[in-house]
Amino acid sequence: MFLTIANAQEKKVTLRVLLPSSTPNNSSMYVVGNSPALGNWDPGKIRLLRENDSVWSFSTGAPSGSVLEFKITRGTWDTEALYVDGVIPQNTVVQVFSDTVITLAPVTWNDISPARRNRAATGRIVGTVNYHRGLKGEGLHFERDLIVWLPPSYDEKPLERYPVLYMHDGQNVFDPKTSFIGYEWRADEVADSLIKSNAMEEIIIVGINNTPDRISEYSDTPLGQSYARFVVNRVKPLIDSLYRTRPSRENTAVMGSSMGGLISFMFVWWYPDVFSKAGCLSTSIGSRTSEKELEERFGKRALDKNLRIYMDVGELEPSLVPGNRTLAAYLQKIGYEQGRNLDFFFAKGALHNEQAWSRRLWRPLKFLFGR
């Protein structure tokens, strides 16, 4: 998701968005993308101009040869434009060599998608979950909820203690009613199936909801460090006090996708004494990241080799494939071994969405907790 520049000559790029008839009244349109002019992936920062009741537009300059990636929203990620009902689209990608006009015609919006509503109405959570509402963290701007999934034998074995997996983007982990696109990771169904087939040990899964600060909180930023301290100093002690956990680092893991994959990797780097396992799916790492940059970043504090790290990336995530391959190669260079403490998986035909992650969730669960 980085702007690449062929030369400095600037070209004009114009977006025109033709609104579907279902667009709520008094809505505003926004573009969100991979440059400051496109909001740096802030879905409510760059507002389009209203031409009339059905057309909004936006113009910006871009260096010739640059690659723009973007989406259209009504101000939040939950209100993303859809071009097929129920299907979250890939980024619109344009390489700019001349003045360009791009016309987009969404068919609906994610928050009002009929397909999403139908999935949410029929979805359910398998097993027992508990909710903990409104947790505050020092240095964080927003409260957030936790959803805790208990393994099948939890009530039947009162003396048993369980490993814990902490998952970011908790709204998307178990419940289609709260998930970003009406599709959740199905972590409850997948874990329940693997446990009952004796393919993995029983674990507790804690979903930590995201907030409007998601991008900053899931990055190597002051907010990201505050979020990590919140999980380590607030969330984990709470879970260990309320549930029968195995609190040691050997039994504590973290997992996420996209920016959640990035912050999961940062967790085991920042706190290897707390987390010994990380699942990093479709990690948002720059396509131009080099091994030299990784060496400079991690050289002063080498990654603990007593970790298990799962990484993957989808074939249809072209902006993420190079960076993920580079990170996997770097880990192997410093001593990680594929199949032992590292599992890097290239998912052929996979897109960047919850459906894709749910289909391969069994892989990190087995690698991190397999019997």
Image (cartoon, rainbow, N blue to C red):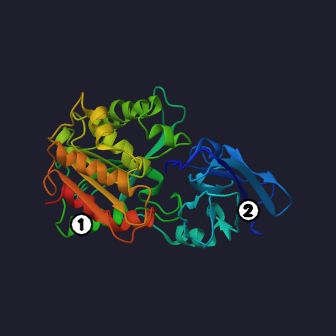
Mark 1 or mark 2, earlier in chain: 2
Question: Which mark is on residue 22?
Answer: none
Residue 260, how many percent across, how many down? Answer: 41, 48
Q: Nearer the viewer, residue 16 or 283?
A: 16
Find disc 2 in the rendering and name its residue. 17
Q: Residues within 10 Å of mark 2 (few under 14, many from 20)?
A: many
Compared to residue 263, the image places residue 16 above or below, namely: below
Number of marks present in the image shown = 2
Three-letter code for the amino acid on which mark 2 is drawn: Val
Three-letter code for the amino acid on which mark 1 is drawn: Leu
The C terminus - image quarter: bottom left
Give the residue displayed 55% in from the left and 65% down from the top: 88
**Cα distance, mark 1 to mark 2?**
45 Å
Compared to residue 23, the image places residue 136 above or below, namely: above
Give the residue displayed 43% in from the left and 61% down from the top: 317
Q: Secondary structure at mark 2?
A: strand
Instruction: For marks 1 and 2, give the one nearer the viewer.
Output: 2
Residue 346 in the figure: left or right of residue 30? left
Q: Secondary structure at mark 1?
A: helix
Q: Nearer the viewer, residue 361 or 48?
A: 48
Name which quarter of the figure residue 350 lies in.
Answer: bottom left
Residue 276, how many percent across, how many down? Answer: 21, 42
Find disc 1 in the rendering and name its residue. 194
Residue 310, how many percent across, how many down? Answer: 25, 53
Compared to residue 192, the image places residue 310 above or below, namely: above
Residue 254 in the figure: left or right of residue 249? right
In the rendered image, is residue 117 in sight? Answer: yes
Residue 69, how many percent across, how many down? Answer: 56, 55
Give the residue displayed 51% in from the left and 72% down from the top: 122
Q: Nearer the viewer, residue 110 or 114?
A: 110
In the rendered image, is residue 161 in sight? Answer: no
Residue 312 in the figure: left or right of residue 371? right
